[in-house]
Amino acid sequence: MLVEVGNVEAIFRYPVKSMAGERVERGILGWHGLDGDRRLAFRRMDDSSSFPWLTASRLPELLLFLPQGGECGTEENLPTHVRTPEGKLMPIFGTDLAKDVGRRYGSPVEMMQLKHGIFDDASISLIASDTVREIGRLASQNPDVRRFRPNVNRGYVVEAKRS
């Protein structure tokens, strides 16, 4: 028996790892997460580790880059361009974007596309609105839920029964 335990307040995807995300009205959730989520990332050319991806922990400015575009009918509707923090629109696989990000980072990078995504820990991230509110209360702030980079923002608990 299915029991309603909450509602989905929002669905987000982050097409390019550590760049700005986007709210989506619907999505397909599969074994490798939400379609189109974290399928692109900058690889640090000077890093041969098992996690060579450039993330916002190394370059916080990445959060200010906004992936855009995506042609309907293309695989996972991935972005075609990125708007820089200064407002310049660049092709996502263009050399200008890689050079700009590499300059900010201080070392060369290249854009990569991985079919199954680039995740730090898990292929889906869920956070409850109550959790965000409690963190905000404890920190005396009003954080935006996207700060936690969830795919699903779950609302209130309606009912929970064990059978």
Image (tube, helix red, strand yellow):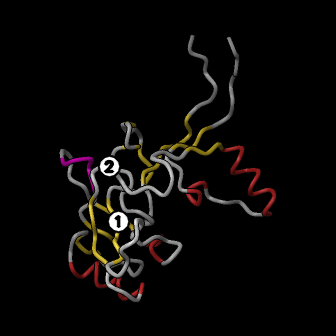
Q: Secondary structure at mark 2?
A: loop
Identify the amino acid type marked 1.
Ala
Q: Secondary structure at mark 1?
A: strand
The quadrant of the picture occupied by the C terminus is top right
30 versus 61 height, above or below: above
121 versus 10 height, above or below: below
Disc 2 to disc 1, C-alpha distance: 12 Å
Residue 34, located in which quarter of the rendered image? Answer: top left
Q: Which residues are magenta?
A: 74-78
Identify the amino acid type marked 2.
His
- Tell me the residue that label 2 is attached to: 116
**105 part of magenta stretch:** no
Q: Is residue 64 left or right of residue 141?
A: left
Magenta stretch, main secondary structure, is helix
Q: Nearer the viewer, mark 2 or mark 1?
A: 2
Residue 3, located in which quarter of the rendered image? Answer: top right
The quadrant of the picture occupied by the N terminus is top right
Q: Residues within 10 Å of mark 1 (few under 14, many from 20)?
A: many
- Tell me the residue that label 1 is attached to: 41
- Which comes sooner in the sequence, label 2 or label 1? 1
Q: Residue furthest front?
A: 49
Task: Name which residue lies at 25% across and 69% down.
Answer: 92
Count the marks: how many?
A: 2
